[in-house]
Amino acid sequence: MQGFVATSLIGISLGAQYALLALGFTLIFGILGVVNFAHGGFYVLGGYLAYSAVTYLGMPYALAVLCAALGTTVLGFLFQRFMLDRVIDDHLATLMLTLGLYLMVSSGILVVFGPQSPAFSFPLTGVIHGHGFFVPIENLVVLGVCIIGILSMYGLIYYTDFGRALRALADDRAVATAQGLRPAILFPAAFALATGLAGLTGALVTPTLSLAPHIGDPVLATSFLIVILGGLGSIGGATVAAFIVGMAEAFSAVYLGGSKGALALFVLVLVMLVVKPSGLFGQRVRGA
Amino acid sequence: MTARSPSMRGDLAEAASVLAIAAAFIVPWLSQNPMIYSLANQMLIAITAAFSVYIMLRMNLMTFAVPTFMAIGGYTVAILGLRHGVTDVLLLGLASFVVPALFALPLGALVLRLTGVYFVLVTFVLTEITQLLLFETPGLTGGSNGLVGMPAVTLFGLELADNRAVLQVTIGLALAGAIVTAAVTRALRQHFAAIEENELLAQSLGLVVWHYKAFGFAIAAGVSGLAGFALVNMLLTAHPTSFSALSSVNYIAYAIIGGKSSMLGPVVGGALLIWAGDLFALRGEYSQFLFGFLIVVVVLVAREGIVGTIHRLGVRVFSPPSRSSTVASSPTVSVPNAMEPLQ
């Protein structure tokens, strides 16, 4: 029972991290129709930006996280505005472009920081003891920030003019543009929002897990899993699917061991793609 | 040069590709240098794997599943050699082609219903599953240890064990892959072009699209399997890391950077990028930066890749000065574009 509680907590905090990542991924697909292979790259970049800010500039960790999120936001904006936008209607071209960016980011980090994991640890340590189980404080802080991030995203998308504009563009770009919405600004802004979320997650999570140039690969794979499970482009679906994947990972790691859980999830996703590409909840999906 | 029809240009490119790979037989005859052998091995394996991407691109499908079928081909050979004592290179070569192709048929029935981004995603998921399966089935694949200590392959009882013989086997497999790719894309050029242009229209005009897609997918899988055999034969082990999900990115890069509209594209792309990677080779990972950069350049400014761009420049230089009016008056003589189907 105690093991069950502890595992559930791990699952929930993994789920929250995944949700923050997957929201950005699904947002980019839903609004721009782009499968962002560079998403894992922005996650890693966020981690390294925060690490550099703390280590070389002596910033406090919280400020470093903000800087990392800001840095990845700006980079995402520029990348969309000056590169991606030129081929935005060609799905395979956008995919190749983000793939190219990912290769450049991850190998660039390798060249600059070297292949070793840098020493980057969470500033708060300590453990809260519950009734027979314990939770590291860092996990709770990360969980809290992730939940705030997820809620702010929902607020932004569903309750602001900016969010309404984005949803209108996702719904029907031609009509939305004719109504006076400007994709030239809104598309890069949406992309920047998503990459900023990936950077934020990276800056938050890497000190509690690990930081190395190639940690973006599994992040990308997990983001794929979640957004396909939740239905590509669906925000609600991605959030729920993130918690499902987080829980499944935590429980299979504790009770099954090895990668059987991951294998089961991937097979589920394969079947899902083939049988029901609209995802678990069957929302309308953007055609591709 | 401008007067040639696209299909004739395709024939030329296919013949040139097959000849270029056949010409690689000179390398083991001329040189003893193990560095050159290693480079030639890597290039030919890269080119063979990129052919597989090229075949799928004929149908406007971008596949990440090349490592999956390479793994099936490679592990088939390793298991046959280690557990069943099969060492004949012709038998093994046949098996490394046929087994992945047979796997591809039921898989194709599932995944070929998807197009565009969804096909990309499903093939990416497939390679991730392959990785996990290789690790999770130690009884069959040796798990994380892989399969080591395969016996040397033989040709009519003759052992092909030294460096030169290994390279000759790789060249033979690449040549087989090139001939199959050329034969299939040549025979089905119009069918594939119709599918690439507009699948629904092709179907409504009476083309049984599903047959051709399944056939193309199986052939692409078989060609990947040949590359897997060559890789396993070169490394003397079959290990999951040889078939990682992200290695598929490299094979796509070879085909796209080389030029996806002609069979010479994968040949030029594979050879040049492996050579460039070797030139940069302080560490293998640095070449990834180069690949990434080149992909961005190709997508943004040179859609046709290296081969297509050279061809376009050649057309511009050698055509008469009134080129612009010629282009305007007859669309069939237009500058080749990577997005155009009939190449």
Image (cartoon, coloured by chain):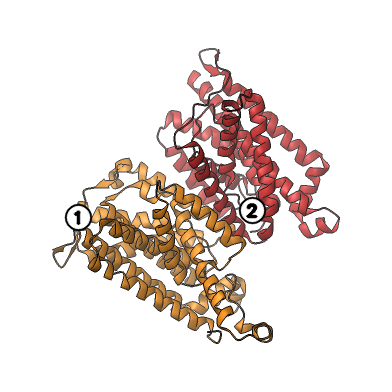
Chain colours: A red, B orange
Question: Is B247 or A167 nearer to us in this picture?
Answer: B247
Q: Secondary structure at mark 2?
A: loop
Question: Is B239 or A267 nearer to us in this picture?
Answer: B239
On the image, the x and y values in percent for residue B20 come to: 36, 73
Quarter of the rendering containing residue B337: bottom right
Asked if residue B246 shows in the view, the reply is no
Disc 1 chain ID: B
Q: Is residue B250 left or right of residue B149?
A: right
Q: Is residue A181 left or right of residue A15?
A: right
Q: Residue at x 49, y 55 (%)?
A: B123
Residue type highlighted by circle 2? Val
Q: Residue at x 77, y 54 (%)?
A: A183
The residue tagged 1 is B84
Q: CA distance from mark 1 to mark 2?
A: 48 Å
Q: Residues within 10 Å of mark 1 (few under 14, many from 20)?
A: few
Disc 2 chain ID: A
The total number of labels drawn is 2
Residue type highlighted by circle 1? His
Q: Residue at x 30, y 59 (%)?
A: B36
What number is the disc on residue A63?
none
On the image, the x and y values in percent for residue B70 come to: 37, 57
Q: Residues within 10 Å of mark 2 (few under 14, many from 20)?
A: many
Please tell me whether residue B245 is drawn above or below residue A175 in the rendered image. above
The residue tagged 2 is A34
Please tell me whether residue B321 is drawn above or below residue A203 in the rendered image. below
Closer to the camera: disc 1 or disc 2?
2
Please tell me whether residue A103 is drawn above or below residue B18 in the rendered image. above
